[in-house]
Image (tube, grey):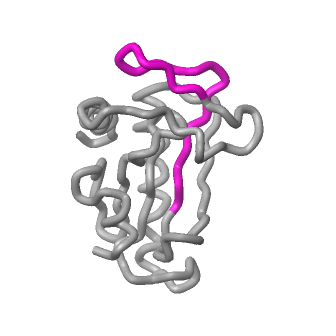
Amino acid sequence: MNATLEKFGYPETLVRDYRHWCVLLRSAQATLGALILAAKGEDRAFSELAPEAFGELPLVIRQIEHGLKAFRPYDRINYLMLMMVDPHVHFHVLPRYREAPEFEGQRFADAGWPGPPDLKSATPITEETRRRLLHAVQSKWPGT
């Protein structure tokens, strides 16, 4: 596993493992259900990925969208490939909500709605809430 996966909490934040990709729960929940879609290899440019990794991507994206929709119906979904601080190939996956959804009585406002997502406006959560959120997302994942 690469350093970017480790920085985003792998393996504790793992939602689903694939052959070439990992889906992780984003610790900083800029929107409820925010994820990281990260390539497992050492590639630092999207164009460097093996053809097999590209071939697996449609399946992973379908499962992300179906899993998140089953967890909480979102209005839009954004995939941000920033790779400015964390160099390995990864996307921030942000379900977007017109109305702030709740999880265990806590509201998760989408501070950037309807514009670009605001990654710095994450709703603070406890470690226990993070664990329960991870389990809730995993329980809605296709094929589980």
Residue depicted at x 66% and y 43%: 117
Work out whether residue 140 can be spotted. Answer: no
- Please state the extent of the stretch shown in magenta in the rendering: 91-109
Residue 12 vertical position relative to residue 108 in the rendered view, above or below: below
Residue 59 lies left or right of residue 136; in this view the side is: right
Residue depicted at x 33% and y 39%: 141
Residue 45 lies left or right of residue 142; in this view the side is: right
Q: Is 29 in the magenta?
A: no
Residue depicted at x 70% and y 37%: 112
Asked where in the image residue 134 lies, by quadrant, the reply is: top left
Camera-side residue: 135 or 21?
A: 135
Q: Is 105 in the magenta?
A: yes
Residue 140, percent from left and from top: 32, 32
Residue 69, percent from left and from top: 48, 31
Quadrant containing the C terminus in the rendered view? top left
Residue 6 lies left or right of residue 108; in this view the side is: left
Residue 40, percent from left and from top: 35, 72
Residue depicted at x 44% and y 55%: 36
Residue ranking furthest to the bottom: 48
Camera-side residue: 69 or 93?
A: 93
Quadrant containing the N terminus in the rendered view? bottom left
Residue ranking furthest to the right: 115
